[in-house]
Image (cartoon, rainbow, N blue to C red):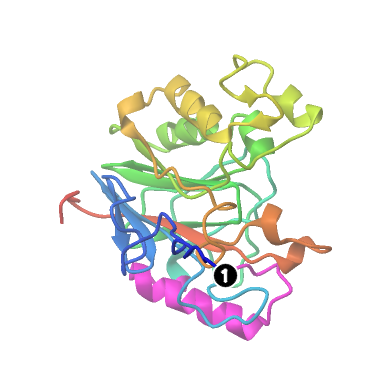
Amino acid sequence: MSTTRKKPATTPMKSKNVWGDRLQPPFKAVGDHIGVDLPGGRALFCTRRGGVSGEPFEELNVGLETNDYMPAVEENRERVARLIGIPRERWLESKQVHGADVRIVDELPEPAAAPIEADGVATTLEDAAAVVVTADCLPVALIAPDGVAMIHAGWKGLAADVLKKGVEQMREGGIEGDIQAAIGPSIGVCCYEVNTHVHRAFMRYPRGTARLSNHAHLKNVARLQLQHAGIPLDRIHDVDICTMCAPRSLFHSHRRDYGADPQDTGRQASAVWRVADSDPGD
């Protein structure tokens, strides 16, 4: 009886640093995570690797509103703080509500202050990090020589122009330099099957751009919004990794993992902060 040897399974992630040559400049591997350096700032898009949470949140879950064991979440957040080199008391976070409000923050909040409700934070502060958490939505870093912003962009926020409003907030906050954008890991058109209600939210965009059959292309919407806000296409960088169909060990994905309770899905952190004379090659 003849047998046929099966070919070994392969994935796009081939190197021992996880990413191999999949990441294209300006993105680069930072251990098990993804970094980007642009003039004026630096961003880190975390994976779910390197934390202490147990199932179903393994490993690096930073979601404060999940059903995870909160001491584990706190330890995970401390680990992210060490990764980016900015202590948690200098994180600028908001309570994300899937809207289009982006706040400019020009002073650190009091430690006991309740988080503002918004889906993005822009700042000119130095030695402070704007942080969002995601599990399929787009984390978008906006970086200029004189300020930065990090925005959480789900379909509802994009339908309400959250990225365009984020750029406008940066300008209103006195950030005048050229802005570049970096779109981190998020659900791709490959996996984002939607109903007609979501499609209708993007009717103003050309068919085949935002709406493809029964799928929505949120990254195309993001690029168009950023262009309409004045950022040239060649300054909009997309890491082009889908959180849902990448290996489960890499990213939390709400659509893939939520089960009966959305709070059973972990969240990964994305942070951006100012760096004086940032050199993309360092």
| Residue that extends furthest to the front in the rendered view of this protein | 1
Quadrant in the rendering for residue 206: top right
Q: Position of residue 168 (x, y in %)?
A: 47, 30
Q: Secondary structure at mark 1?
A: loop
Q: What type of secondary structure mainly makes up the magenta span?
A: helix
In this rendered view, identify the residue nearer to me: 257 or 89: 257
In this rendered view, identify the residue nearer to me: 117 or 188: 188
User: What amino acid is labelled 1 in the image?
Assistant: Val
Q: Position of residue 256 (x, y in %)?
A: 68, 56
> Which image quadrant: the C terminus?
bottom left
Instruction: Please state if 194 lies on the left or on the right of 75 as rendered.
Output: right
Quadrant in the rendering for residue 143: top left
Reply yes or no: does residue 166 show up in magenta.
no
Reply yes or no: does residue 68 show up in magenta.
yes
Instruction: Please state if 101 lies on the left or on the right of 9 as rendered.
Output: right
Residue at 26 percent across and 45 percent down: it is: 25
Q: Is residue 40 above or below residue 132?
A: above
Residue at 31 percent across and 64 percent down: it is: 15
Residue at 44 percent across and 64 percent down: it is: 8
Task: Specify the segment rendered in magenta.
Answer: 63-88
Q: Position of residue 149 (x, y in %)?
A: 43, 46
Query: Which residue lies under the disc numbered 1?
Result: 62
The crowd level at tag 1 (other Cα within 10 Å; few <14, some 14-19, many 20+) is many
Residue at 43 percent across and 37 percent down: it is: 170
Q: Position of residue 189 (x, y in %)?
A: 58, 36
> Which image quadrant: the N terminus?
bottom right
